Image (cartoon, rainbow, N blue to C red):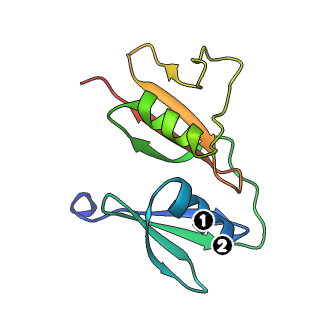
Amino acid sequence: MLAQCDVIGFIPSKDAARARNFYEQTLGLRLISDDIFAVVMESNGTMIRIVQVKDFTPFPFTILGWKVENIEAEVATLIEGGVSFKRYHWLEQSESGIWTAPGGAKVAWFPDPDGNVLSLSQHPK
């Protein structure tokens, strides 16, 4: 049923123009449209709607993430682009902010301009 349908992600933003710049210029997502309802981006075939909201409190956990092949390279590229990765005192993270889970997966978290937590992850093959 729904397993055969495309997924659409939704991200709240207090400033859609600022969010558009971040997702398009910093993260490299492709712009599909920008209107009064949402800034619509595309990431590898997945639609992401950045919805303008008057006010909200960002969740303290990941709302959207990308599975990557080489997390160290992706993190380095984003740091060069001005992204700051989150540090969690209860996790042992690399200097660049990458945590290695007991099962071998690697994860790094970063905020968007609204404070939404995004992540990169690399999973063992």
* 51 is higher (above) or lower (below) than 60: below
Question: Could you say whether the residue bearing mark 1 is in a helix, strand or loop?
Answer: helix
Structural crowding at the residue carrying mark 1, measured as other residues with C-alpha within 10 Å and reported as few (<14), some (14–19) or many (≥20): some
Q: Residue at x 63, y 35 (%)?
A: 85
Residue at the spot of label 1: 21
Q: Quadrant for the N terminus, please.
A: bottom left
Q: Residue at x 30, y 62 (%)?
A: 45
Q: Residue at x 61, y 19 (%)?
A: 95
Question: Could you say whether the residue bearing mark 2 is in a helix, strand or loop?
Answer: helix
Tell which of 99 and 76 is nearer to you. Answer: 76
* Outermost residue toward the front in this view: 80
On the image, the x and y values in percent for residue 110 come to 61, 40
* 88 is higher (above) or lower (below) than 92: below
* 124 is higher (above) or lower (below) than 61: above
Tell which of 108 and 57 is nearer to you. Answer: 108
* 80 is higher (above) or lower (below) than 47: above
* Label 2 with label 1: CB-CB less than 8 Å: yes
Structural crowding at the residue carrying mark 2, measured as other residues with C-alpha within 10 Å and reported as few (<14), some (14–19) or many (≥20): few
What amino acid type should be assigned to the residue bearing mark 1?
A: Asn
Residue 71 in the figure: left or right of residue 112: left
Give the numbered dot on residue 17.
Answer: 2
The image quadrant that residue 87 belongs to is top right
On the image, the x and y values in percent for residue 52 come to 66, 74
Residue 23 in the figure: left or right of residue 69: right
